[in-house]
C-alpha cells in the first residue's frame, strides 16, 4: 500500500513538472482562434511553385545544341554570319528569356561552395553548365565564348570601332581575371557570398533592373566595349581563365586560314581582341645561353615571389573577412559590448533577439577569419605563381613563323576568316589566281616597307 | 631523352602538350565526378525564414525586380480575425474602418472584410503589396503573428546570389529545395498551382 501511495505522489509531482513544459510546446496564441457561427470557410494559402525542374533540363538541351552549333559554325562552316545569328539567339534565350541565371561564370562559385560546404547539394544542371563548356574547350577551343555566353554576346553586339590595347597594358590587365577568380573562389569557399554574380555588369540589362551603381558599371562597360572589344571577357571574366587554360591544350582549334599561311598580313588587324600572333623572327633567341640564364633567374625568383605574395594575401585576412556577414556582425557586437558604440543597428538587434550566445558568435567569426587567413595565403601564392608564369611567357618568346591565333585568348568568333584570301577562294568569291596576286601584292608592300 | 630512341618520333613539346591535355581532361572529369556525387537533381531556391525575419523593410527595396518578389502572406489558421487588428490599423487610430488614413499598409494591399460579429477577415492583394513588412511587425507586436513575409516563387527570378539575402541584417535568407520552397508559419493547408 505504502509503495502504491508513493508511486502516485511521484506521478503527481511528475505531472506538475510536465504541465509547464506542455504549455511551452504549444504555439503561443495571444488571440484565441475564433469559433465561427456562420458557414465561413477559411481560405487556403496559395503557394505558387518555382519554375519546374523540367525547364532546367530544357536549358541543358539548349546549351548542348548551342555549343554544338557554335563549334560546327566555327570549325566546319567557318561562317561568321551563322555564329552571329546563333549569338543573337543565345543573347535572347540565356540572357533575356532566362535572365542570365545560372551561367557557367557564376557556376564557378556554386561549384566551390559545394566543395567546401557539405550541406549544400549543388543542382545537377549547374554542374553540367559548369563542366560542358570547359570540356568542349579542351577539344575545340572557346566556342562557348564565340556564340553561347550571353555576357559575351551583349558586348560583342556593341563592338563598333575596336582599338588596339597596347601590349604592355594588355599584359598587365590580363592578370585581373586571375585575381577575380581567386577572390571569387575564396569568397564562395568561406560562404561570404557570390561576388561574380554581385558584380555582374550586364545582368541588370537582362532583368531590366539593377542597383544604380551596377547600372552605371554596366553602361560604362558597354561604352568602353565600343572601342575596346569585349572588355569584360578579356580583362575580368574569371571563367575565361579556366577556358583559356583548357583552350591552350585544345586538340583542334580554329585557324585564320583554311589553307597554309602565306604571311600576306591581310588578317593582321582583323582581330579586335588582339588574339592573333604575328610571325616574329626577331624573337628567335639569338643567344641561347642568355635566354637560359633569364629562365633560371625567374625560376629562382619564383618561390620568393610566390611566398611573398602569399604573405601579402594572408595580411588581407582582416579586411577581406569583414565582408563575411558573420565576421562583420561579430565586430559590431564587440563594439557594442565594449561600449564603443551605443546605438544598436538592425543587424545587432536581430542577433540579440535570436538569443544566441555571444561567445558562440565570436568563435564562429574567428573560425571564419582563420579560413580567410589560410585562403589568403593560397590566393596570394596563386597570384604570385601567375605573375611568374606571365613573366616567363614575356621573356621566353616562341618561334613563330606565320600568322596564327593565340589559342588561349582566341574566342573563335570567326571575324578573321574572311580576311584570308585563301578563305575567299574556299568560298568561291575569288579565284586562286586572284588570291595569289593579292598575297604577292601584300608581300611586295611588306618588302617595300622593310 | 627516351623519345629519341623510340620508333615513333614524338616531339618533346608534343609529349608535354598531350600529357597536359590528359591531365586537364582528367581534372575536369574528376571534378565533375566529385560534384555529381554531391549533387541533387533538385534546384535550390531562395527563401526567408519568417521566424528569424525582423521586418527591417530591406526586402521591399533590394530585390532586382522593379517590384520585390517578397510579399506578405497570411496564415489564416493562425489569425485571430480581430476587429482591432494591429497589422491592419495604424497604431492609435480612433476609428476602425477601411479609410486610407487608418490603414497601416502604405499601399493599401490588405483588404478587410466583415465575416461575422466581431470577426474580420484580412486578405492580401499581392499586386499591391510591396513586401515592406510593416503589417508583419504590427501583427507580431500585438497579434498572433499570422502575417509574415515570403519570397513568392511565381515572381522570384531565383538569382544565383539573391540581392536581398546579402543585405539581410538578420541572415534570415537561405537556399531551400525547390520541392519545399516556402517556410510556412502555422499548420497551413497549402494549395499548389
Image (spheres, coloured by chain):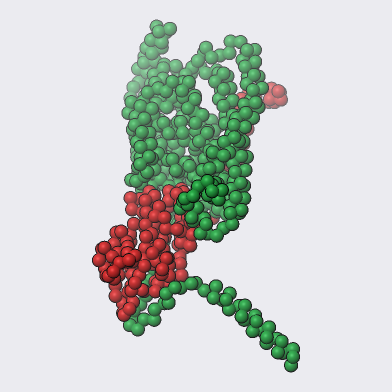
Q: Position of residue B114 (x, y in %)?
A: 29, 75
Q: Position of residue A398 (x, y in %)?
A: 55, 19
Q: Is residue B94 above or below residue B181?
A: below
Q: Is residue A50 above or below residue B15?
A: below
Q: Position of residue A147 (x, y in %)?
A: 40, 37
The picture quadrant where one finds residue A397 is top right
- On-image quarter of the N terminus of chain A: bottom right
- On-image quarter of the C terminus of chain A: top left
Q: Position of residue A429 (x, y in %)?
A: 33, 25
Query: Looking at this view, is B121 or A428 the one in front?
Result: B121
Q: Is residue A243 above or below residue B100?
A: above
Residue at the spot 26% in from the left edge and 68% down from the top edge: B98
Tint of chain B: red
Q: Is residue B69 left or right of residue B43?
A: left
Q: Is residue A223 visible?
A: yes
Tint of chain A: green
Q: Is residue A290 left or right of residue A52?
A: right
The picture quadrant where one finds residue A11 is bottom right
Residue at the spot 43% in from the left edge and 70% down from the top edge: B144
Residue at the spot 63% in from the left edge and 12% down from the top edge: A290
Query: Looking at this view, is B41 or A167 the one in front?
Result: A167
The picture quadrant where one finds residue A190 is top right
Q: Is residue B192 visible?
A: no
Query: Looking at this view, is B90 or A286 the one in front?
Result: B90
Amino acid at each position: 500500500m505504502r509503495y502504491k501511495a508513493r508511486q502516485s505522489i511521484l506521478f503527481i509531482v511528475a505531472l506538475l513538472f510536465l504541465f509547464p513544459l506542455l504549455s511551452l510546446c504549444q504555439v503561443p496564441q495571444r488571440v484565441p482562434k475564433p469559433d465561427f457561427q456562420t458557414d465561413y470557410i477559411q481560405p487556403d494559402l496559395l503557394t505558387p511553385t518555382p519554375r519546374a525542374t523540367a525547364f532546367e533540363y530544357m536549358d541543358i538541351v539548349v546549351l548542348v545544341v548551342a555549343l554544338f552549333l557554335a563549334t560546327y559554325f566555327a570549325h566546319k562552316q567557318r561562317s561568321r554570319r551563322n555564329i552571329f545569328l546563333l549569338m543573337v539567339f543565345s543573347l535572347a534565350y540565356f540572357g533575356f528569356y532566362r535572365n542570365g541565371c545560372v551561367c557557367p561564370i557564376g557556376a564557378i562559385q556554386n561549384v566551390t561552395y559545394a566543395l567546401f560546404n557539405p550541406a549544400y547539394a549543388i543542382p545537377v544542371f549547374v554542374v553540367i553548365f559548369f563542366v560542358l563548356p570547359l570540356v568542349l574547350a579542351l577539344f575545340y577551343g572557346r566556342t562557348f565564348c564565340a556564340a553561347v555566353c550571353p555576357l559575351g554576346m551583349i558586348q560583342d553586339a556593341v563592338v563598333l570601332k575596336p582599338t588596339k590595347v597596347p601590349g604592355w597594358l594588355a599584359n598587365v590587365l590580363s592578370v585581373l581575371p586571375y585575381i577575380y577568380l581567386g577572390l571569387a573562389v575564396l569568397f564562395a569557399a568561406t560562404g561570404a557570398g557570390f561576388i561574380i554574380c554581385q558584380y555582374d555588369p550586364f545582368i541588370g540589362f537582362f532583368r531590366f533592373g539593377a542597383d544604380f551603381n551596377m547600372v552605371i558599371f554596366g553602361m560604362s562597360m558597354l561604352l568602353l566595349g565600343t572601342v575596346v572589344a569585349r572588355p569584360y571577357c578579356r580583362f575580368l571574366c574569371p571563367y575565361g581563365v579556366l577556358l583559356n587554360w583548357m583552350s591552350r591544350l585544345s586538340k583542334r582549334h580554329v585557324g585564320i586560314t583554311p589553307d597554309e599561311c602565306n604571311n600576306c598580313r591581310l588578317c593582321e588587324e582583323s582581330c579586335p581582341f588582339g588574339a592573333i600572333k604575328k610571325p616574329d623572327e626577331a624573337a628567335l633567341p639569338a643567344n641561347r645561353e642568355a635566354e637560359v640564364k633569364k629562365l633560371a633567374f625567374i625560376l629562382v625568383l619564383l618561390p620568393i615571389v610566390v611566398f611573398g605574395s602569399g604573405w601579402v594575401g594572408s595580411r588581407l585576412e582582416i579586411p577581406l573577412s569583414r565582408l563575411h556577414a558573420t565576421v562583420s556582425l561579430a565586430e559590431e557586437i564587440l563594439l557594442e559590448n565594449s561600449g564603443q558604440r551605443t546605438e544598436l543597428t538592425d543587424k545587432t538587434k536581430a542577433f540579440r533577439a535570436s538569443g544566441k550566445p555571444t561567445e558562440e558568435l565570436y568563435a564562429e567569426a574567428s573560425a571564419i577569419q582563420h579560413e580567410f587567413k589560410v585562403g589568403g595565403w593560397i590566393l596570394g601564392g596563386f597570384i604570385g605563381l601567375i605573375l611568374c608564369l606571365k613573366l616567363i611567357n614575356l621573356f621566353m618568346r616562341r618561334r613563330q613563323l606565320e600568322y596564327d591565333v593565340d589559342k588561349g585568348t582566341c574566342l573563335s568568333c570567326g571575324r578573321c576568316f574572311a580576311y584570308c584570301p585563301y578563305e575567299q577562294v574556299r568560298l568561291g568569291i575569288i579565284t586562286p589566281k586572284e588570291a595569289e596576286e593579292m598575297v604577292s601584292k601584300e608581300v611586295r608592300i611588306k618588302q617595300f616597307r622593310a | 631523352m627516351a623519345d629519341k630512341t623510340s620508333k615513333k618520333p614524338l616531339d618533346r613539346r608534343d609529349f608535354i602538350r598531350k600529357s597536359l591535355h590528359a591531365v586537364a581532361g582528367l581534372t575536369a572529369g574528376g571534378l565533375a565526378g566529385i560534384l555529381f556525387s554531391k549533387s541533387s537533381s533538385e534546384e535550390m531556391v531562395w527563401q526567408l525564414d519568417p521566424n528569424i525575419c525582423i521586418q527591417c523593410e530591406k526586402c521591399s527595396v533590394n530585390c532586382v525586380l522593379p517590384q520585390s518578389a517578397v510579399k506578405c502572406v497570411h496564415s489564416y489558421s493562425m489569425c485571430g480575425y480581430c476587429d482591432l487588428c494591429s497589422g491592419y490599423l495604424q497604431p492609435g487610430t480612433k476609428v476602425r474602418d477601411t479609410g486610407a488614413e487608418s490603414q497601416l499598409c502604405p499601399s493599401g494591399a490588405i483588404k478587410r472584410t466583415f465575416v461575422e460579429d466581431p470577426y474580420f477577415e484580412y486578405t492580401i492583394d499581392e499586386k499591391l503589396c510591396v513586401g515592406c513588412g510593416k503589417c508583419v511587425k504590427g501583427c507580431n507586436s500585438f497579434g498572433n503573428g499570422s502575417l509574415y513575409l515570403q519570397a513568392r516563387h511565381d515572381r522570384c527570378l531565383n538569382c544565383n546570389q539573391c540581392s536581398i539575402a546579402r543585405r539581410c541584417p538578420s541572415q534570415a535568407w537561405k537556399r531551400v529545395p525547390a520541392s519545399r520552397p516556402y517556410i510556412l508559419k502555422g499548420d497551413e493547408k497549402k494549395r499548389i498551382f
